[in-house]
Image (spheres, rainbow, N blue to C red):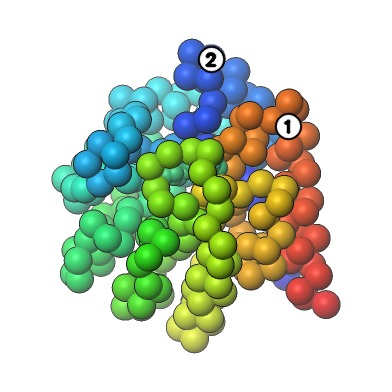
């Protein structure tokens, strides 16, 4: 069955002094998730927001919080983010070796949240082979994590296709999210490859009309998905 593409605007590009209005705006625009970029200044050079912010965001958001943890020690902090109300939690494969990745996914599920694993641009999909059957989503980074407003890394859509193939082989249905440099110029190629959830920072929040941008990006993504179904 055809599932429409969901847009997950990243509040990293929002107005932090008017976050409530900026979240209401994307909800009215039809966004599927609020994408929350948590950066620790260690796993990535940038430092953004943390647990108290997620707790506050949970009070005002009417759509699920998609919390992208770009932190070096996810196992230590996961319980806090889960307790704060994260609905979808993404951990980076590069931060969790072997059994620890498995452990993190179980912790997320035990708390009743959905589990996602992110792959940096140079991380091969093989690292999720042993856990793909229990994931709700895989996040393919199409920029080096750390900053919004970067250019899409050409060829990232190939990794989306690799995740689709791996999930199919495992007989497991999951969502694929793409994050970094996605907008009207790049959404079609990632959706044609199989992306379901599109993170947009600048393409939504720096647009003249953010609601129209959400609608336009979703429309382009849906058309691209439908075209490959034919
Ligand atoms: C980058 C973040 C992204 C970023 C997206 O590390 O994970 O979510 O804010 O911003 P754009 O869409 O502007 O690349
Ligand atoms: Zn992100």
Q: Is residue 54 above or below residue 64?
A: above
Query: Which residue is at the front of the view, 227 or 1?
Result: 227
Residue corresponding to mark 1: 211
Q: Residue furthest bottom?
A: 169
Report x, y in % for residue 91: 33, 53
Q: Is residue 134 above or below residue 65?
A: below
Residue in the image at 42% along x and 61% along y? 121
Residue in the image at 43% along x and 39% along y? 147
Circles 1 and 2: CB atoms closer than 8 Å: no
Q: Which secondary structure lies at badge 1? A: helix
Q: Residue furthest top?
A: 17
Mark 1 is surrounded, within 10 Å at the Cα level, by few (under 14), some (14 to 19) or many (20 or more) other residues, namely some
**Residue 61 disc label:** none
Report x, y in % for residue 65: 47, 39
Residue in the image at 36% along x and 25% along y? 53
Q: Quadrant of residue 189?
A: bottom right
């Amino acid at each position: 069955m055809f599932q429409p593409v969901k847009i997950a605007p990243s509040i990293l590009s929002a107005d932090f002094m008017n976050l409530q209005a900026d979240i209401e705006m994307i909800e009215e625009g039809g966004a599927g998730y609020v994408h929350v970029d948590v950066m620790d200044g260690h796993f990535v050079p940038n430092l953004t927001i943390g647990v108290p912010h997620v707790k506050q965001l949970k009070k005002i958001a009417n759509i699920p919080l998609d919390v992208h943890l770009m932190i070096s020690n996810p196992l230590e902090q996961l319980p806090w983010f889960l307790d704060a109300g994260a609905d979808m939690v993404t951990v980076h494969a590069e931060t969790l070796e072997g059994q620890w990745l498995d452990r993190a996914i179980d912790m997320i599920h035990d708390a009743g949240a959905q589990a996602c694993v992110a792959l940096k641009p140079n991380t091969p999909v093989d690292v999720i082979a042993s856990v793909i059957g229990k994931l709700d989503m895989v996040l393919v980074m199409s920029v080096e994590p750390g900053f919004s407003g970067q250019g899409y890394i050409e060829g990232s859509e190939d990794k989306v296709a690799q995740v689709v193939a791996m999930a199919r082989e495992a007989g497991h249905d999951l969502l694929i999210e793409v994050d970094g440099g996605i907008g009207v110029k790049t959404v079609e190629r990632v959706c044609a490859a199989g992306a379901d959830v599109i993170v947009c920072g600048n393409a939504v929040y720096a647009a003249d009309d953010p609601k129209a941008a959400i609608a336009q990006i979703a429309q382009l993504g849906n058309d691209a998905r439908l075209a490959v179904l034919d």
